Image: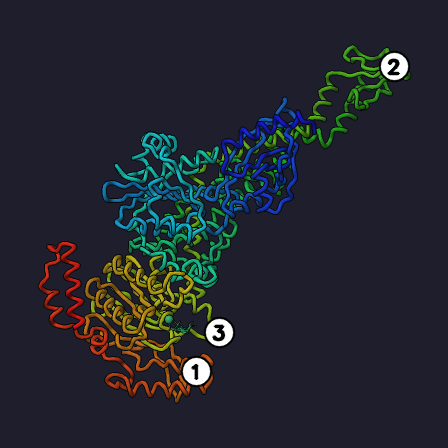
Amino acid sequence: MAEQAVSPMMQQYFEIKKQHPDEILFYRVGDFYEMFYDDALTASRELELTLTGKNCGKEERAPMCGVPFHSYETYVARLIAKGYKVAICEQMEDPALAKGLVKRDIIRVVTPGTVIESSMLAEDKNNYLCAIYLKKQRRSWRAGVCFADISTGEAYATELSAEKMGGAIITELCRYMPSEILINTAMLDLKDVTAYIKQHTSALVELREDACCKDSVIDAELTAQFGADWRRTCGFAEGGMVPYAVGMLLGYLKETQKHGIERIRAVQNYADAQYMRLSPVTRANLELTETMRGREKKGTLLWVLDKTETSMGKRLLRAWIEQPLVDSAAINARLDAVEALYQENVARGDLKEALGRVFDIERLTTRILYGSATPREVCALGDTCEALPQVRRIAEASTAPLLQKLAADIDPLNDILTRIRSAIGDDPPANLKDGGVIRAGYNAEVDELRDIMHGGKGFLSQMEARLREETGIPKLKIGFNKVFGYYIEVSRSYTGSVPDTFTRKQTLTTGERYITPELKDLENKILGANERLLVLEHQLFADLLSAISGEILRIQKTASAVAQLDVLASFAEVAVCNNYVKPTVDDSDVLDIAEGRHPVIEQMLKGSLFVPNDTTLDEADNRMLIITGPNMAGKSTYMRQNALIALMAQIGSFVPAASCRVGVVDAIFTRVGASDDLAAGQSTFMVEMTEVAEILEHATKNSLVILDEIGRGTSTFDGMSIARAVVEHICEKIGCKTLFATHYHELTELEQDVDGVKNYNIAVKKRGEDITFLRRIVAGPADDSYGIEVAKLAGLPSSVTRRAHEVLRQLEASAPGANASMQLDFETVHAYQNPEVPSEVVDKLKSVDVETLTPIEALNFLYELKKALAK
Ligand code: ADP
Ligand code: MG
């Protein structure tokens, strides 16, 4: 390539690159996106592309690599997944028509939170972009957080003002799991949040300059999006932080997306109190949407409950599981709807069949709005419209108010269907460029152009015949050559009969060649037909997209109703398949379950039967159940199943039990076995205690708390003391419903000492040295720990277990108090942990007034104490 031809383009490249130093620049050149210099080095490494060089007018060739434009999505997706951002630079005019250098511009910056291509998104998960605006006002922190899914147009925002702001923000992040997080500079001081994001998420963090958060800028963003009256129309509280977060997010979108942010039409303000509080740890422990070990869907509550038909339903189901409700009326509305669908097997089947024909119109609408939808996708919207009347009819036929409401929200979108069907042919090509998208009969010019293209020869022979007749020249011929195009040839003997309208073009020995305006017209048509047809089809398709875009609110509302129906039908289907019952949900303080089962383990067991168990918990006499039993008896399973049943009820699902009553719980807390999080890196005991501290701080009377073997991470006596103190605190100060599994038999004494504590154990049958797990929960403490028997079950050689029994007998004989069952008396333990303190020291301590001590006096005092002890 000549030097002069290349350099101006590279100049243009540098101009554009200057504005996007942090992104990998995909620079459109013909049929490729090319990358240069550092971008090329990075991309070739990350995408395993061949690195070449481009002559750029300088001495050294520029490192370069490229990807074909038609498959760029997969490459962008891989870069995004690796944490890069990609700026897409397009040719803004047709290179064939451009005079000089082709105009180019950035049309979009693709970032993890702004992806809309279905190939880059998980269909069953929302993809959230998050903005956090933090402000320190004297001593209190306040924050606005906003989560938006650009691919569906949903946006949620809330205001946080907590003493422990870090924890509150992390809780919100866990709720939505954003893939990209915008923060203002004040957020840099919240080290716990930034550390959390780095360690526990793969989200990209983007620091927004203070200039982006100025009042005037925020006001301008919100005005542009929602009108001058945004504060009222969006329902933002006066003086709140939410507008800053929303404004920050909109500003970022405007910067990165040249268009399409109009998809966000409203922001839902949610209050923390609308949903059950679930700490990040609890979400993980209960394995709601991913397993602890493999982080997979299989083996989670989501996995059990997902019998949805649509991607929209899948995403909503996940969202519902992540956010159980606390309003019993709202919960019962869902439960009644599920019940209606549960009872009507035929209707449910029909509904699911119809839902199966519904495409992901939520995300499709976004691509239609962006103008990037393909003809096939628009056809899919048509197919969806065809399924809507059936969906609506079934919902309408039910008496459940929620189903009625959803039916009313479903707009059959008839006009859109008609429009799509009339404009687009059956079975359109995947790509608009391939032509043949517009249906015959939709547009007269398209039809004519197609006729010309396909029947061009016919036109010519028709014209030839007509001309022969008109002129009376029998041998008149229409021919074609490259120089003159189409011409009329008349042999020499007839040139005299040629009419005036013919213009002579060429003289041959045998005759003359002419053209006429009519022939030129036809020639232009034939030669230009293909090109013109493509342009016209493009135009008509774009018109169709923008017409559909105008109806976006109706589509969005319909999509949301369909998604809800899908989830409700899924709940009903699961309830039928897995034999669930409708729970009674009210505002009582009771959790009463007859024959409850663990929803996931019962599915995993396959073949062997899950043993159901009862539970009675309230905020009075049965506040705390202390559950003992040997390892592997089923303590953890039992406790989690109760938490899961309460949670399932509060998302509106039926539950695995024979009958069940759930007084709404405001939060579930879990602290699960130290052995389970060895990988955490931190000392497990520290982790455990931090989590217990959090529970004690945040649990209320209406919470459900699960403590699984706390105190395990330290020495027996320490652990037991802590466990006991925690139990006392929860029972006396908080009064919440609590399930407490422990292998400290000593703790079963608490039943006598503390109101509301009840002992239970998971029964095992002992025969000789062998035991069988009965999996039954029964009242009363376990009588033994059966550690050695369990070890035997696990396959420890019998010589070892026999010796263990011997050692145990010796230990029991020599234990303090020689208690036969080796239960340590709590008083003894206490004394052991607190050896007599000389009374002199105690007296000194009692008499000192700490407030008035100077540091020096305090040091002296300490010195004296030590001396007294040493005596
Ligand atoms: P623990 O916490 O007492 O050590 P787990 O709750 O971990 O015991 O249970 C151990 C195993 O026992 C579980 O993985 C499960 O396979 C089985 N199990 C527990 N409860 C039941 C039950 N009710 N019915 C059938 N199998 C159960
Ligand atoms: Mg356990």
Query: In the image, which is nearer the foreground, mark 3 or mark 1?
Result: 1
Determine the secondary structure under disc 1: helix
Disc 2 + disc 3, Cβ < 8 Å: no
Disc 1 + disc 2, Cβ < 8 Å: no
* N-term mark: 2 or 3: 2
Which residue bears the numbered disc 2? 494
Residue type of the residue flagged with mark 3: Gly
Q: Residue at left 67%, top 29%? A: 531
Residue type of the residue flagged with mark 1: Lys
Residue type of the residue flagged with mark 2: Tyr
Which residue bears the numbered disc 3? 607
Q: Compare residues 705 and 534 and report the one nearer the observer.
A: 705
Which residue bears the numbered disc 1? 792
Q: Which residue ends up furthest to the left in the rendered image?
A: 847
* N-term mark: 3 or 1: 3
Determine the secondary structure under disc 3: loop
